[in-house]
Image: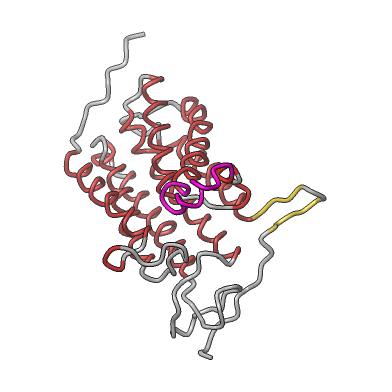
Amino acid sequence: MLHAIPFPRIDPVLVEIGPFAIRWYALAYIAGIVIGWRLARRLVQRPPRAATPEQLDDFIVWATLGIVLGGRLGYVLFYRPGHYLLHPWEALYIWQGGMSFHGGMLGVILALWWFARSRGLDWLRFADRVVCVVPIGLGLGRIANFINGELWGRVTEVPWGMVFPGAGPLPRHPSQLYQAALEGAVLFAAMMVLVGRPGLRARSGFLSGAFLAGYGVARITGEFFRQPDAHLGFLWGGATMGQLLSLPMVAVGAWLMLRSRAEPEPARPAA
């Protein structure tokens, strides 16, 4: 057996009182939304202003629905369509796990467009500020994956390899932590640098494109260390489903950045 670091067995349930339980994974979602909401309230007010803090408050409900409904539907369609075609009622069993970031992303994009249209906002400018806080939730979610001992990495000989419960006797990459760093910390730092530049904030769609391309590159990189889903395995050209779904993100993100132009802030009516 190769050298391995013992996996820190952390109870996935943080608090349990009778039938009521708070899991780390649920807490990661809640913390990501709350922390992101508080930061986004400040970002939308930076010139050129994308929305009011009160409008951002209203959007949180829309974003939460987009994340949950889109994430679940994406998992059903992208990862296990055959299973849910035979057992469609199980698509409602969200407590059994199974969420897709790419599906959640599409759900939030739809929510952004619909909400901005209903409020008379520039939806790309609004999206530019919202995407800057998304890496917070992504990083926390990956840490929760690690705590749950799920979505482990490929077999490795690196000295920090770990033996995960249920993954066999060989040490594996703690790929959840790699992805937490890339999709969370690194991407968040990059977005904070970009949103801090007035010239880039004025280019409608640039920050959205930077997030899409940045996440796509981070996800593709992280997938080289992550064990693909057992029921899918390696797909076309030895790529994983996560990599294939991320390629369009990189392309669309690059296109948005290239097409972005500085747009003047709409004139406010005189008092």
Give the quarter of the figure containing the C terminus.
top left
Residue 209, percent from left and from top: 27, 44
Q: Could you tell me which residue is drawn at 21 percent across and 48 percent down?
A: 254
The residue drawn where x is 44% and y is 85% is: 157
Q: Is residue 271 above or below residue 162?
A: above
Q: Is residue 97 magenta?
A: no
Q: Position of residue 239 (x, y in %)?
A: 31, 65
Q: With respect to residue 264, does 252 lie above or below?
A: below
Query: Which is more toward the observer, 134 or 94?
Result: 94
Residue 26 place in picture, x, y as percent:
61, 49
For this orientation, the residue located farthest to the front is: 86
- Segment colored magenta: 75-89
Q: Which is more toward the observer, 240 or 14?
A: 240
In this rendering, would 54 be left or right of 49?
right
Vertical placement of residue 92 versus 51, above or below: below
Q: Position of residue 246 (x, y in %)?
A: 32, 54
Residue 221: quadrant of the picture? bottom left
The residue lying at 29 percent from left, 49 percent from top is 249
Q: Is residue 11 left or right of residue 257?
A: right
The relative height of residue 63 versus residue 35 in the rendered view (above or below) is above
Q: Quadrant of residue 116?
A: top left
| Left or right of 269, for residue 154 | right
**Residue 77 in magenta stretch:** yes
User: Which residue sits furthest bottom?
Assistant: 1
